[in-house]
Image (spheres, coloured by chain):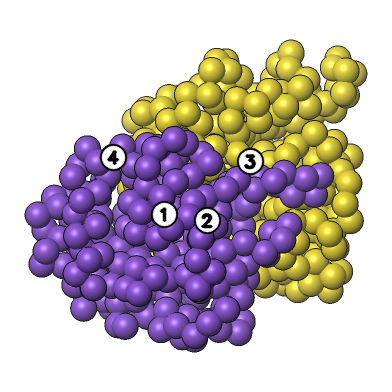
Chain colours: A yellow, B purple
Amino acid sequence: MSTVSIEEVPVETTSANPAPASERSMDVATRVIPCLDVADGRVVKGVNFLNLRDAGDPIELARKYYEQGADEITFLDVTATVENRATTYDMVRLTAEQVFIPLTVGGGVRSTEDVARLLASGADKIGVNSAAIARHELLSEIADRFGSQVLVLSLDVKRSPRTESGFVVTTHGGRRETDLDALAWAREAIERGAGELLVNSIDADGTKEGFDLELVSAMRELSRVPVIASGGAGRLEHFAPAVKAGADAVLAASVFHNAELTVGQVKQALRDEGISVR
Amino acid sequence: MTVSIVDYGLGNLGSVFNMLRRIGEDARIVSEPSELAASERLLLPGVGAFDVGVDRLERTGFADGVREFAASGKPLLGICLGMQLLFERSEEGGARGLGLMAGGSRRFAAGPSLRIPHMGWNSIIPVREDPLLKGVEDDNRFYFVHSYHVVPDDPAHVLAESDYGGRFVAMVRHDNVAGAQFHPEKSHAFGMTVLRNFAQQ
């Protein structure tokens, strides 16, 4: 994912913990998830909000990645203003009519009503980020009404000496630090019913130097739910280490949008490392 | 033949409907049990908690409607929670299911390397031949997302298994009533094959 996201960055790091990849999750394939940051109905890319560039039509890109073998698609509504919500619902609906893999939608989700509308539009999972930081109960409300399987906690994480674990939760695309220890927040979110963690490293995001493997490991160790690693993917060889550190899924944005890598190439690179993919 | 999709307020009806249309099959969403008599194929989707599903089926009148449809001998397919609802009970709640098959659902036992829910693309292993499995017998991957899995009392009802910390039941059949724990509507080409098999069987 890029750092443009204001609101919900559905990034999940995965299990850093225990079992080697060969024993993990038995036969479940490691998922490769392209992420589309969307503003006003267009995919955007850029660093922070300063230089957003148009990267294409979200529906066309989603279909392209679907045809390349993507295991899921994540949409992140990075503007998520009230006025463009209708555009988001239309985008999800039109995508769901032609893309038959799970769709996760995040960005600006503030209430169970927002969740209901996104699910009715065709989303399968909902990423929640800053609204849950502001009001933790939102997570329980969503999980109680729709089930944990729809609820993805999105975290934008930065290294910081201010917290016990050394990882702090940020908002506003990483520009504002909260007081939340990232690991404590992930633990609380799971207790409140989050069914998946999307862990985006703000430090790694945009560097193209690889995922933050320590962060992935730390999240895996505490999490009994799937972990999606996000932030930092730049080359094919970056993906397998994230899985070996415990990620159940790997998420990337710009390497796919820039056509530097295809989903198929990433899967082959994982397969070459003995990791099960679809 | 037209596939009727039960709208009882749970589940991603749109996805099932969209996929059926994409593969050129007729589909319609039925919101009234009275519409079931004229249906040729019935699909019971479902996402969410077992007791909520039972409650919705009963309050909408679909509980009796689906049982009557099953008794007619016409093909019925339950998906995910829709499959678990075909059974008598679930560890997830205290409500009584439709009871079209004996048995119930159990929760996966979490372990250090076993994440719950079971979420992602997994293979199924057919244990008998079936029209629904035509074309996916060998190589396949389906999208699963669930924390409970069915345990039929009668092993003869098991159609296919999958592996997640041990074998579990991924598909069932009892005469004209079948179920799939995975989501064909989210399973790309293999999902299309299964739904086509159902529409054309």
Q: Is residue B196 above or below residue A114?
A: below
| Category of crowding for the residue at label 4, using alpha-carbon neighbours closer than 10 angstroms: few (below 14), some (14–19), many (at least 20) | some
Horizontal side of residue B73 vs A96, given as left or right: left
Q: Nearer the viewer, mark 3 or mark 2?
A: 2
Q: Report the residue at 51% width, 60% height from top.
A: B153
Disc 2 with disc 4 on a shared chain: yes
Q: CA distance from mark 2 to mark 1?
A: 8 Å
Q: Nearer the viewer, residue A70 or B104?
A: B104
Residue B160: which quarter of the image? bottom right
Disc 1 with disc 4 on a shared chain: yes
Horizontal side of residue A229 vs A167, given as left or right: left
- Residue A71 lies, in percent from the top left, at 59, 62
The label on residue B150 is 2
**Residue of label 1:** B87
**Residue of label 3:** A196
Q: Is residue B157 above or below residue A83?
A: below
Q: Nearer the viewer, residue A184 or B197?
A: B197
Say which amino acid is labelled 4. Arg
Say which amino acid is labelled 1. Phe
Residue B62 seen: yes
Say which amino acid is labelled 2. Val
Q: Nearer the viewer, mark 1 or mark 4?
A: 1
**Residue of label 4:** B56
Q: CA distance from mark 3 to mark 2?
A: 23 Å
Disc 2 with disc 1 on a shared chain: yes
Q: Do the residues bearing badges 2 and 1 touch, measured as CB atoms within 8 Å?
A: yes
Q: Is residue B56 above or below residue A235?
A: above
Q: Do the residues bearing badges 3 and 2 touch, measured as CB atoms within 8 Å?
A: no
